[in-house]
Amino acid sequence: MEIRVEIVTSGDARRIVAASSLQGYGHREKIDGYKRWMIAGKWSLFYNGTGKRFINDPLIFRPNGRLLEGKHRIVALSELEGDFEAPFWVLRGFTAVDAFSRWIDDLESGRLPSSVAINAPRRPSPPVR
């Protein structure tokens, strides 16, 4: 698995919404807020101190192509007219769904999410200069 940057258009987002059965999904206030940020040009890959929490998290897709995480952001983009586009970090082929679900459950219940060991090869970090 690899996280990469993808430019997602509103048309791409509409296809993701349809493929992931997200029609009617989500909290309208959150979706509308994301739309305002996108339209205002405040959407960014990196947190700059002015954005909303989680907008810089990756869109996470399961191996079957269904969206697991980033649903409000994709619904917001899908509702924008024309060929609006926005950059996202994207992770495709995510298989650690159980560990991810436990982490979300902890977060939503107000507990500090526990780290979960996922058996994945680690590359050595480059030396800091």
Image (spheres, grey):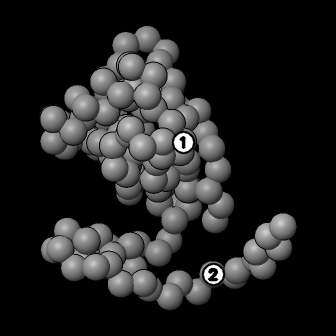
Does the rendering let one see residue 28? yes
Is the N terminus in the top left, top right, bottom left or bottom right quadrant? bottom right
Please report the residue visible at 33 percent of the width from the left and 43 percent of the height from the top.
52
Q: Residues within 10 Å of mark 1 (few under 14, many from 20)?
A: some
Q: Position of residue 105 (x, y in %)?
A: 23, 74
31 lies above or below 107: above
Comes first in the chain, label 2 or label 1: 1
Q: Would residue 33 be found to the left or right of residue 124 on screen?
A: left
Which numbered disc covers residue 120?
Answer: 2
Q: Quick check: 91 above or below 19?
A: below
Q: Give the spatial CA distance, label 2 vs label 1.
A: 25 Å
User: Which residue is located at x 38 percent, y 19 percent?
Assistant: 39
Task: Look at mark 1 in the image and give the residue it sits on.
Answer: 45
Task: State the image coordinates of residue 31 (x, y, percent, origin top left).
Answer: 24, 35
- In this orientation, which residue lies closer to the viewer: 48 or 15? 48
Callout 1: SS? loop
Q: Position of residue 12 (x, y in %)?
A: 49, 30
Q: Residues within 10 Å of mark 2 (few under 14, many from 20)?
A: few
User: Residue at image x 22%, y 79%?
Assistant: 111
Three-letter residue code for mark 1: Leu
Residue furthest front as drawn: 129
**In the figure, 39 relative to 87: above or below?**
above
